Image: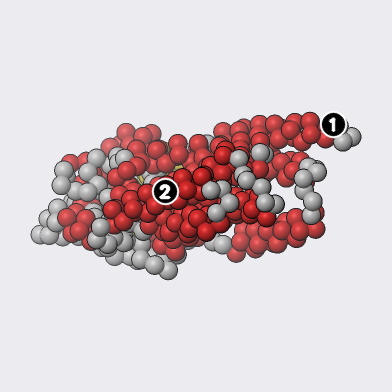
Amino acid sequence: MTTFLPSVIQFSYLAAASLFIVGLKQLGSPATARRGNVLGAIGMLIAIVATLLDQNVLNYEMVLVGILIGSALGAYMAQKVEMTAMPQMVGLLNGFGGAASALVAVGEFWKGVDAGRVLPLDDTITIILSVLIGGITFTGSLLAFAKLQELVTGAPITFPFQQPFNLTLVIGFLVCSVYLVMHPADTLTFLVLIGLSLVLGVLFVLPIGGADTPVVISLLNSFSGLAASAAGFVLMNNMLIIAGALVGASGIILTEIMCRAMNRTLANVLFSAFGSSQTSSEGSAAVDQDKTVRSIDTEEGAMMLGYARSVVIVPGYGMAVAQAQHSVRELADQLERLGVEVKYAIHPVAGRMPGHMNVLLAEANVPYTQLYDMEDINPDFDRTDVALVIGANDVVNPAARHNTTSPIYGMPILEVDKAQHTIVIKRGMNAGFSGVENELFYQDKTVMLFGSAKDVVAQLVTGVKDL
């Protein structure tokens, strides 16, 4: 049995990696996402069991304690965390993943120091990389969590000479890394590297504003995968290397997709402090202050929707905050009862994380066939009777198409202004995450329904039922 055990472990890792790849592929579609998630979970279970069979695992009691505590916390979070707080939880889990990878590297370094042996060059370099990526992921994710949870301001935070200061820290990390390579047992230098990586994580996220939150979450997810892969090299564990590489690659691909959806480069997202007060004032200046806003009541809104032939619903973060997705589904059901064709338009960066709107609508059992991506639904707007915008802002701002002075110029948007009529549900006239005022609100074909999305949609449901 002992002779075949290593082969059994590696074969199990291969099977788990295959399940990860297939599951990841199925996560690309809402129709297969649940099955993909189950396949990934089964693959992870196989990988954990195979790892526990390894003779290098010496203390099964501590492993069991960790599994029990982690499982209890995970089950509690799954039950208690609301869907609107999912972005925060994803950011937090990214941070935990980075911290775990960094701790593996720290443990391997200290094990070598305690044993009095000099670590090989490749081990030292791998440990340094794992500490760097894991540390940045940990503190960066914690700060992203704090911004999303509104524990700190979501606006970009900048200070004089910020970039030179960051560059100095990076150079300092490189110098200390070279010194540690030359003196692999120097614990003080290693502690300085850990501290620098943690500080760099904070400074990495500090200047990033709310409008770029989805991109940051995706990028930090990629970092957590790279940190896990680096930890795999430290431990010489093939499963960690493969799983981490998959997460890292998929995360960076998703990051690029998100940047393309905003027509911005990753460098611009990370270093432009988009959404600052200066940006906000520049964007607001583009709106003609002489224009007025037309508002209606829910009775008029229900009549517009009920007598339409086609309605496109555009969900945004306002819907998520109000937990209005179930009411939206009920409204769609009532409209379909009257023979109205209902579709949902999903912008890639709507909400606070990639796929946020898809997850919320899936929770309300909205049929996948009614969800349309931006490039698929935009040609239909000029044939749409009513576009119903629920809490979305920047992703429907026409200024992105024609106003060259607007900070969001060039960003692909949902072209709701081309519909025959547009109803916008919002609490007030505040700008979106980008801080740019929305021209859509002032257009002749646009009417506003002010109030909480959940309350307003519930009143629309009542009104449509009476038609």
Residue assigned mark 1: 4
Secondary structure beneath label 1: loop
x, y percent for residue 347: 38, 44
Q: Is residue 151 among what the camera can see?
A: yes
Q: Residue at x 71, y 35 (%)?
A: 13
> What is the CA distance from the residue labelled 1 to the residue labelled 2?
45 Å
Residue 213 — which label?
none
* Callout count: 2
Q: Residue furthest right?
A: 1
x, y percent for residue 313: 39, 48
Q: Taking 355 as reference, is 408 left or right?
A: left
Residue 175 — which label?
2
Q: Count neighbours of disc 1 (C-alpha within 10 A) and say few if under 14, some if 14 to 19, many if 20 or more.
A: few
Q: Quadrant of the N terminus?
A: top right
Q: Amino acid at mark 2?
A: Val
Q: Residue at x 31, y 56 (%)?
A: 165
Q: Amino acid at mark 1?
A: Phe
Residues at badges 1 and 2 in contact (C-beta under 8 Å)?
no
Q: Is residue 304 above or below residue 340?
A: below
Secondary structure beneath label 2: helix
Q: Quadrant of the C terminus?
A: bottom left
Badge 1 or badge 2: first in the primary sequence: 1
x, y percent for residue 169: 37, 54
Residue 220 vs residue 329, the one in the foreground: 220
